[in-house]
Image (cartoon, helix red, strand yellow):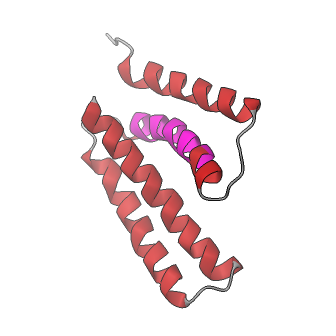
Amino acid sequence: MLFTIVLFIAAGLAEIGGGYLIWLWLREMKPVGYGIAGALILIAYGVIPTFQSFPSFGRVYAAYGGVFIVLAVLWGWLVDRKTPDLYDCAGALICLLGVGIMLFAPRG
């Protein structure tokens, strides 16, 4: 289970970080190197989930979506300095509950 969590966090940071670098390049007029680095990191984001042990692509990506939401809220708080409100936190917790149900519920 720890490996699963580490891969989800790595994928999330790659997706958010890569997108953020491209955002900085295009919206904040940073040098083109930001865009190139962002693109390379986004490629890594596409590869990282393939190391998950779950056999279903759709289930892995659906569960990852919940983890992504939590990481995006944290990124906004820590990097963009936008403090999450009660509804952000409640929504993120609900997403994590959904992730747990999708990945770890007993199936026949």
The C terminus - image quarter: top left
Nearest the viewer among 4 and 76 is 76
Q: Tell me the quarter of the picture where residue 45 sits.
A: bottom left
Is residue 39 something one can see in this rendering? Answer: yes
Using the image, determine if residue 68 lies above or below residue 56. below
- Residue shown at 66%/31% (left/top)? 89
So how many labels did they put on this image? 0
Nearest the viewer among 51 and 28 is 28
User: Relative to 5, is 14 on the left or the right?
Assistant: right
- Residue shown at 51%/81% (left/top)? 34
The N terminus - image quarter: top left
- Residue shown at 52%/28% (left/top)? 96
Using the image, determine if residue 47 lies above or below residue 8. below
Span of residues in magenta? 58-73
Which percent across, then down, holds residue 49? Answer: 34, 48
Which percent across, then down, holds residue 19? Answer: 55, 66
Which percent across, then down, holds residue 88? Answer: 70, 35
Q: Is residue 19 magenta?
A: no
User: Relative to 20, is 87 on the left or the right?
Assistant: right
Q: Tell me the quarter of the picture where residue 92 sits.
A: top right
Using the image, determine if residue 12 lies above or below residue 45. above
- Residue shown at 63%/72% (left/top)? 23
Is residue 55 something one can see in this rendering? Answer: no
Query: Overall secondary structure of the magenta stretch?
Result: helix
Which percent across, then down, holds residue 32? Answer: 54, 89
